[in-house]
Amino acid sequence: MSAVRVLRREVGCASRVMLRSPQTLFLVVALPVLYLVIFGAIFSGEEVNDVPGRSWNLSVSVIMTASVVVIGVVSATFQSLTMTLAQDRERGVLKRLRSTPLPSWVFFTAQVLTALLVSVALAVLVTGCGALAFDVALPGRRTPAALVTLIVGALSCSLVALPFSVLVRRSAAALPLAFGVSLGLFFLSGNFFPGKALPDPVASVADIFPVRHFFVAMLTAFDPHTTGAGFEWDNLAVLGGWAVAGALLALRWFRWAPTGDR
Amino acid sequence: MVIDDACTEQPAGAPGPAPDGPARDEAGGQAIRVRGLRKCYGRVEAVRGLDLTVRRGEIAALLGPNGAGKTTTVEILEGHRSRTSGDVQVLGADPRRPTREWRARIGLVLQSTQMPAELTVGELVARFAAFYPSPRDVDETIELVGLTAKRRARAGRLSGGQQRRLDVALALVGDPELVFLDEPTTGFDPQARRQAWSMIDTLRTLSKTVLLTTHYLDEAEALADRIAVVVDGRIAAEGTPATLGGRDSAPCEVRFCRPERLDPAVLDLVAASAEGSLTVVGGVVTLRTADPAGVLGPLLDWARAHGTELPGLEVRRPSLEDVYLAITGGLGARRSARRLEDSR
Ligand SMILES: Nc1ncnc2c1ncn2[C@@H]1O[C@H](COP(=O)(O)OP(=O)(O)O)[C@@H](O)[C@H]1O
Ligand SMILES: [Mg+2]
């Protein structure tokens, strides 16, 4: 069977695994939508005027929609992949797959592609919720920027998950580690504090990691006052750097066998 | 210390001598050839100089107690674990650097493995079939392992025995030449065990080469053409179920209840002529001899001549269990001795 057909089938399997797992559905779909609804309801109609880098007022609903798109994508990529890969490795699934002629690039591509597809679906869902419930304007002519940001951010967070999953040594540690690290990054990156400027030290720590760059770029794409196409090339470049780093680290360190196998 | 010397890792990629190239392997009909295999985990030497040959089309069993080194050996052959030293050829290649083509010719069941709980039996078998250049029919493979009724069930909902059968289906769906089964029935109830046996037996009709590991004696006896007993990282004995441990040529026991009219002197004479040893306890005669016919002939002649019988007559060869216990018992004792030595 040709590699492309195997790839298609692998994407089918990976997305079925994702969509049939209640744990993933809760973390990836329910929780982000819940964030949007709760924050949106609390701050409904409010505007903030001290958004970093902006001279104009911005509705909190717009900020939260962009923020929750990012939260959803990080959950669908980084969190979900870390958990799947670490758990499957410890349960011997990866070792079993490694015993077959399945090329490893097909396996990785299928995992990442699935995470990207789910990310796109989730971004559409969250944007739709924002538009319907809180009157958030769609990106309009900044749609290409929103899409590119979405893909680059999702790719970056997916590829980072590959080496990160290796740090998770036990199945039971996968959920707390993946969830804990992303929650920490959401707080650090201001995803839960719409429009508030972060203290400088926090901001400079947050700037090391991909989430804040992802959020900033996504907010620009959602901000109706943005002039021009809405691409934040600096932030996208950092995301691209993380993507490359994740891929290189994975090439070097990825493990197929359970911890303890030698 | 000797063990430390043995545990120095061979430089990876060192060109080990490969006396049997692929061509010779085909000709010699050897699927697996292992010479002097060693494997250390830190200071523990799990495999200590193991030799093994499995011919094509043969069902061979590695039989041995837990911790004997069976899984370690099999996983080295599968290309999953590194080895400390030794020559290994599997289907004419060194499993240290497995290629996709080589993997396509091998099917396996790992000792402990699970499949993604969310996928169904049908989806998983079809998924694995897609990995191989010329797979078996998916439905037929599911039928072969008796899971047709569970085709739409998710892997996570299967019982332990059904999951193991799914593992076997995944091992076979690529239509491999060589199949590794690491403890295929551990944890099964007796009925599931019989079913698994008959399934493995059908591999014979598909003319696959099979290397299975087990710590169940009856399993090895029921399934294997050849049994290699592994104790303490070495092959302690090797043979067919009938000949293992010299079982076919070992002394027999001839036993019966002594008829009153049988003169002890006659017994002595018979025993002496067959070079047997004689014990009589509570009226039960036991004659141990390598020549049971030489004992039975004169005794039956005597009985016929006196119009009587030899009540409770039985001729017993050492059972496979006797042989196995003798082999593993002896080595087990030696192992304890070595532990003592190591701990000094
Ligand atoms: N990954 C490992 N790390 C350290 N020791 C191991 C590892 N795997 C097996 N061993 C040790 O090697 C010996 C042989 O184990 P194994 O090959 O699993 O035996 P078997 O399959 O015959 O039960 C045991 O003493 C076991 O504790
Ligand atoms: Mg084992």
Image: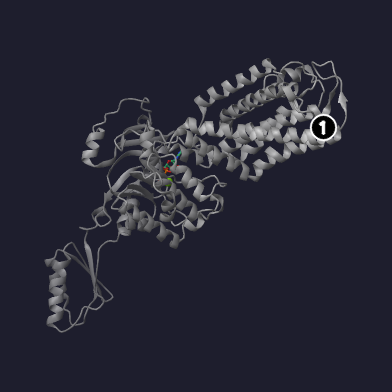
Q: Position of residue B74 (x, y in %)?
A: 38, 42
- Of all residues, the one furthest to the right in this rendering is A46
Q: Which amino acid lies under the numbered mark 1 shown in the image of this protein? A: Asp
Left or right: B64, with B239 as reference point:
right
Q: Residue at x 34, y 38 (%)?
A: B48
Q: Residue at x 13, y 72 (%)?
A: B297
> Residue B340: in sight, yes or no?
no
Q: Position of residue A103 (x, y in %)?
A: 45, 32
Residue sitting nearer the eye, B159 or B229: B159
Left or right: A43, with B268 as reference point:
right
Q: Position of residue B156 (x, y in %)?
A: 56, 50
Residue bearing the label numbered 1: A135
Image quadrant occupied by the N terminus of chain B: top left
Q: Kindly tell me whether mark 1's CB lies below 8 Å from ligand 1.
A: no
Dividing the image into four quarters, tell me where ligand 1 lies: top left
Vertical position of residue A129 compared to residue B197: above or below? above
Q: Residue at x 36, y 42 (%)?
A: B233
Determine which quarter of the picture holds residue B86. Answer: top left
Q: Secondary structure at mark 1?
A: loop
Residue sitting nearer the eye, B270 or A235: A235
Image quadrant occupied by the C terminus of chain B: top left
Q: Position of residue B89 (x, y in %)?
A: 30, 36
Determine which quarter of the picture holds residue A39. Answer: top right
Determine which quarter of the picture holds residue B32. Answer: top left
Residue sitting nearer the eye, A175 or B341: A175
Mark 1 residue crowding within 10 angstroms, few (<14) / some (14–19) / many (20+): few
> Residue A162: in sight, yes or no?
yes
Please state the chain letter of the residue tagged with numbered disc 1 in the rendered image: A
Vertical position of residue A155 compared to residue B328: above or below? above
